[in-house]
Image (cartoon, helix red, strand yellow):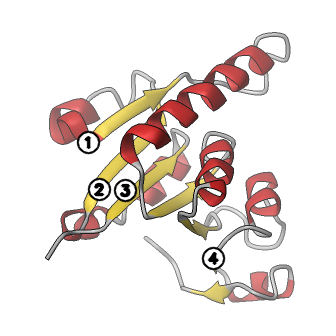
Amino acid sequence: MKKKKVLFIASTGGHLNELMQLSPMFNNYNYYIITEKTKSNISLIEKYQRRISFLVYGTKDKKLIYPFKFIYNCLKSLVLYIKIRPKYIITTGTHTAVPICYIGKLFGSKIIFIETFANSSTKTLSGKLIYPIANLFIVQWENMLKLYPKAIYGGWIY
């Protein structure tokens, strides 16, 4: 039986840490990981080798440079999507994941979004953007169901 292609994507830091909590299930799929390239996660290459790619690290704190990095990451996301062709895209956010989720939706991938554990009472920007296109939207706090009525409560990833 052929394993389904699943793309796991998150920005670096806490979102990536949450995503990596799902790593025990990686080997059940023909999986691929995308995140931002930083000193803190470059070691992931050793573990995941050809199953990981990096986007340019971009923070909205640098307002002049960020739009250029975002555009570059959008283009690179399109190239990576065409290369990977995942059946499913699973993400914990944030800005790094939004473009590939929209690209994936356009090409027929199923989108699974897990709203971050860090937000227990407000929507994240990536959550707001992906909620309308998500096939499955999971929240980690039960009270978040008030903000995302079509979501399901999945409990904490940690």
Q: What residue type is labelled 3?
A: Met
Q: Pick the residue in front: 150 or 88.
A: 88
Q: Are marks 2 and 1 in contact (CB under 8 Å)?
A: yes
- The quarter of the picture where residue 40 lies is top left
* Residue 147 located left or right of residue 49: right
* Residue 10 located left or right of residue 120: left
| Residue at horizontal 54 percent and vertical 84 percent from the top | 155
Question: Disc 1 marks which residue?
Answer: 51
- The quarter of the picture where residue 142 lies is bottom right
Which residue, as the protein is rendered here, is positioned at the far front?
107
Above or below residue 63? Residue 116 is: below
Q: Are marks 1 and 4 in contact (CB under 8 Å)?
A: no
* Residue 99 located left or right of residue 6: right
| Residue at horizontal 77 percent and vertical 81 percent from the top | 144
Q: Pick the residue in front: 47 or 30.
A: 30
Question: Disc 4 marks which residue?
Answer: 135
**Residue 1, percent from left and from top:** 13, 77
Q: Pick the residue in front: 66 or 41.
A: 66
- The quarter of the picture where residue 123 lies is bottom right
Q: Do the residues labelled 4 and 3 touch (CB within 8 Å)?
A: no
Locate the C terminus by quadrant. bottom left
Q: Earlier in the sequence, mark 2 or mark 1?
A: 2
Residue 20: give its label. Answer: 3
| Residue at horizontal 27 percent and vertical 36 percent from the top | 44
Q: What residue type is labelled 1?
A: Arg
Residue 31: give its label. Answer: 2
**Residue 24, percent from left and from top:** 24, 68
Closer to the eye: label 3 or 2: 2
Closer to the eye: label 1 or 3: 1
User: CA gap, disc 1 to disc 3?
Assistant: 14 Å
Above or below residue 100? Residue 44 is: above
Q: What residue type is labelled 2?
A: Tyr
